[in-house]
Amino acid sequence: MKETRWSRETRTVLRDAAVAGLLSLMTLAPLAFIPDSMYAIKAIAWSLLMCASVIPRRVAPLISLAILTVAGVGMVFTLTAPMPSLLAVPIVIYSVGRYRRLSGLQYVIAFGIAGSLAGPISWTRDLDAKYRFLGTSVVVLLCACVVALAYLGGRYMRERVLNASLDREIVTERFTAAQRQSEQESLLATGRARVEVAQELHDVLAHSLSVIVVQAEGAKALTAKRPEAAAQALGVIAETGRKSIDEVRRIVALMRGEMESPRFGPAPTLSQIPELVAGAGDRIDLKISGDVPLVPESLGLTAYRIVQEATTNFLKHAGPTATATVSVSYLADEIDITVSDDGMGALSKSDGSGSGVAGMRERVAAMGGTLEAGPRAGGGYEVRAQLPMPSRLGKSWLKEAAR
């Protein structure tokens, strides 16, 4: 058998009916001692109706007020004394202020004025004439105060509950917004990390594979004529491959948070630029002016990657007979890097899949520098980067770059 579930309104009405029943028992008991039986019957009937007005007080406050008004009118015209059931009046008035969505103030005012005048006048009409006005005035004021305080108390509680509910909604909305923002920041950070890893892998693998291809072609051409030179080229290929593997491992370890592992070395620095250029082949000359400065790891890695990417582009696009020059100048306030060649790289067509120049621009811009890349006068291609030293940008840049 399916269980019947009462609605919330039904349960509310039943609870208020229990309250009305308890109020009836409390207020009707004194009426049993009234000697006039007809007067007692009228008092009990109107008192029951007044107590019954409590039943729909929360689901239909205005209906409760209407029932209360009818009972009050009946008492005024048939009874000469106040009844204990008048305790229902502040309960119903409070309910109108507390549970009425739209303000029922006009109904309460009408009821308060009429009830506060009609009731006391009917109760004090048997008083002595010299006390009647004063007694009636006091009772009228008392009734009006009870009605006003009951309604104001109901409105206060309604506003308090609504404000508390609004506060909870605001807190929930703020939490949801903060959670959404955190998720978006996490996605952005993940995207940036992916771009950085892709750039690192591109720089490492593109350079290493270009060197390997150039050395392999040279070894193939020298195998018959100069076996010892071919063997040397194969050695360069093996060494370049090993370094590339170490670089890839370092990047993967960085993303896994394993940089504390002793198996992987630190990121490339300025002092490794000569070794990088030497490994790219004898068609590239290196010129360094000034002493190698002590710079943050991020700045040293950027300079290294600029030279690496520029030499990679030279090996890929300049042609087999072209030569290049790498110039690195360590000045007091900046590092100047120029990689120029006399090849045909400026005339070669891009396949659209590379990101070398764009990657270099991003790296240089992140360090606050400038980069120019394009054909040079007299033929060939040139890449020139200017990386400001930390002393030129201020201490705040050092903190940001070290992150």
Image (cartoon, rainbow, N blue to C red):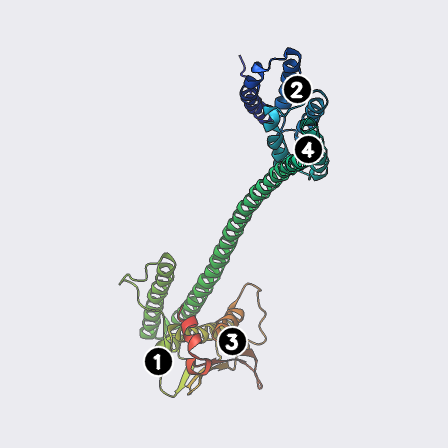
Indicate which label's residue lies in the foreground, 2 or 4.
4
Q: Earlier in the sequence, mark 2 or mark 3?
A: 2
Q: Give the Cα separation between the discs numbered 1 and 2.
A: 99 Å
Q: Which amino acid does label 4 sit on?
A: Arg
Give the quarter of the image for residue 230: bottom left
Residue located beneath label 1 in the image = 294
Q: Which of marks 1 and 3 is nearer the N terminus?
A: 1
Residue 46 numbered tag:
2
Of all residues, the one furthest to the left in this rendering is: 262
Q: Give the Cα separation between the discs numbered 2 and 4.
A: 26 Å
Q: Is residue 142 visible?
A: yes
Instruction: Kindly identify the residue that appears in the image at 27 percent across and 62 percent down.
Output: 263
Quick check: 361 left or right of 255? right
Q: Which amino acid does label 3 sit on?
A: Ala
| SS at mark 1 in the image | loop
Q: Which of marks 4 and 1 is nearer the N terminus?
A: 4
Q: In x, y percent, where is residue 270?
A: 37, 78
Residue located beneath label 4 in the image = 132
Q: How many labels does the image show?
A: 4
| SS at mark 2 in the image | helix
Q: Give the Cα separation between the discs numbered 1 and 3.
A: 33 Å
Residue located beneath label 3 in the image = 318
